[in-house]
Image (tube, rainbow, N blue to C red):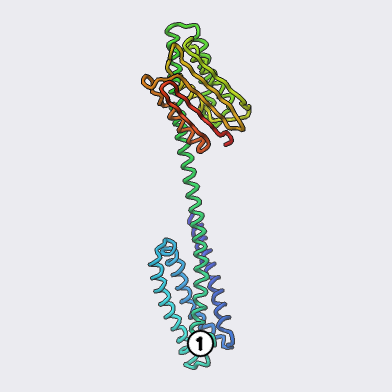
């Protein structure tokens, strides 16, 4: 690490040295126009170099990064004015240096361009402005890259948080679903019902789905419907003649995929909170697909006074829809005194 750091600093030092040598050549060429006194031109150029270097480094290492880039514009303007005054004063001294020490108070012996303070100032500030513009561009590019990197980190963090929240919601749905189903089997086992082995088989299919499929981001829609059928079969055994159920499907493509355990909680909710009226619990479900747009409707007999419909499953499924299908679904819940209806429209093109 130390060797790399030293190598980087030596590289920067070499680059700066080469650049300032180039500036010195520029000065000797610029101030040497219409002058044959090379010694005068070189000495005058060498005298200007510290002024140019100091002004440039103050600009690129102090004024721009500490005040301009941090949007402290008043201080940037104030200190820039101080720098301009001091550097202008030194430029005036350089002209007098050429007049007094290099030409022996002989105005005619001075290089023509070095006599004009405006030209001398332009040559110095031209270098300062070019280097400052390059530094500003470099800092802007670095700031842009840093902003993109931070945005990328923020997006990654948000995705991880959403993934964790989604997994948490799934963990809540699974025990909730299993608890209800196991209660049903327990009741049948107490009565030593003949349907108990078949119920356990159906439950094992559902457990296989929960353990090996529900952790996937997407599963086949047909697979989700098959497990809804298994769940309905369990409920039919539990309710016997007190259940009236209708489940129809239309235009279900084999290649259509959906987030796992997305529809099943709605079905579970209709049985858990449904109310038997006139000797029957009525549950009606219909699902159809048109151009990869899924329409799912379910309703059940209901009584507000006896059975609140708000449960963990329904609340969690709404959160999962927001996470997985944000702005790609509509969910309408119609809670009347006699019926509880859910209508879900889902865009499965995502």
Q: Quadrant of the C terminus?
A: top right
Residue tagged 1: 115
Horizontal and vertical percent position of residue 316: 44, 30
Instruction: Determine the residue located farthest toward the left in the rendered image.
Output: 305
Horizontal and vertical percent position of residue 309: 41, 24
Residue in the picture at 59% in, 24% down: 222
Q: Is residue 253 left or right of residue 343?
A: right
Horizontal and vertical percent position of residue 148: 50, 51
Residue in the picture at 54% in, 88% down: 112
Instruction: Return the residue nearer the eye: 130 or 199.
Output: 199
Instruction: Return the residue nearer the eye: 269 or 85.
Output: 269
Packing grade of label 1 (10 A; few <14, some 14-19, many >=20) is: some
Instruction: Return the residue nearer the eye: 185 or 278.
Output: 278
Horizontal and vertical percent position of residue 64: 45, 65
Residue 209, compared with residue 166, is above or below; it is: above
Q: Secondary structure at mark 1?
A: helix
Residue 201, compared with residue 58, is above or below; it is: above
Instruction: Return the residue nearer the eye: 345 or 339.
Output: 339
Residue in the picture at 48% in, 73% down: 53
* Number of numbered markers: 1
Residue in the picture at 58% in, 24% down: 223
């Amino acid at each position: 690490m130390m060797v790399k750091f030293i190598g980087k600093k030596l590289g920067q030092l070499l680059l700066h040295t080469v650049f300032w040598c180039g500036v010195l050549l520029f000065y000797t060429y610029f101030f040497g126009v219409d002058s044959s006194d090379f010694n005068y031109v070189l000495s005058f150029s060498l005298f200007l170099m510290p002024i140019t270097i100091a002004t440039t480094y103050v600009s690129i290492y102090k004024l721009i990064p500490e005040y301009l880039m941090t949007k402290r514009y008043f201080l940037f303007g104030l200190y820039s004015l101080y720098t301009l005054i001091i550097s202008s004063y030194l430029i005036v001294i350089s002209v007098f240096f050429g007049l007094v020490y290099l030409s022996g108070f002989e105005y005619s012996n001075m290089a023509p361009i070095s006599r004009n303070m405006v030209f001398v100032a332009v040559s110095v500030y031209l270098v300062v402005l070019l280097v400052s513009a390059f530094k500003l561009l470099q800092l802007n590019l670095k700031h842009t890259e840093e902003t993109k990197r931070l945005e990328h980190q923020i997006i990654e963090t948000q995705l991880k948080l959403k993934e964790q929240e989604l997994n948490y919601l799934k963990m809540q749905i699974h025990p909730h679903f299993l608890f209800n189903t196991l209660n049903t089997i327990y009741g049948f086992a107490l009565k030593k019902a003949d349907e108990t082995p078949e119920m356990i088989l159906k439950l094992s299919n559902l457990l296989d789905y929960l353990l090996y499929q529900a952790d996937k981001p997407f599963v086949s829609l047909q697979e989700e419907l098959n497990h809804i059928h298994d769940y309905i079969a369990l409920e039919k055994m539990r309710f016997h003649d007190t259940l009236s159920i209708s489940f129809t499907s239309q235009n279900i493509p084999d290649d259509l995929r959906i987030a796992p355990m997305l529809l099943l909680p709605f079905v579970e909710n209709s049985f858990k909170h449904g109310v038997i009226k006139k000797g029957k619990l009525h549950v009606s479900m219909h699902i159809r697909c048109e151009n990869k747009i899924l329409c799912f409707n379910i309703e059940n007999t209901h009584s507000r006074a006896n059975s609140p419909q708000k449960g963990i499953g329904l609340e969690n499924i709404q959160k999962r829809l927001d996470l997985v299908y944000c702005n790609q679904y509509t969910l309408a819940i119609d809670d009347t005194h006699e019926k509880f209806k859910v209508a879900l429209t889902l865009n499965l093109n995502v």
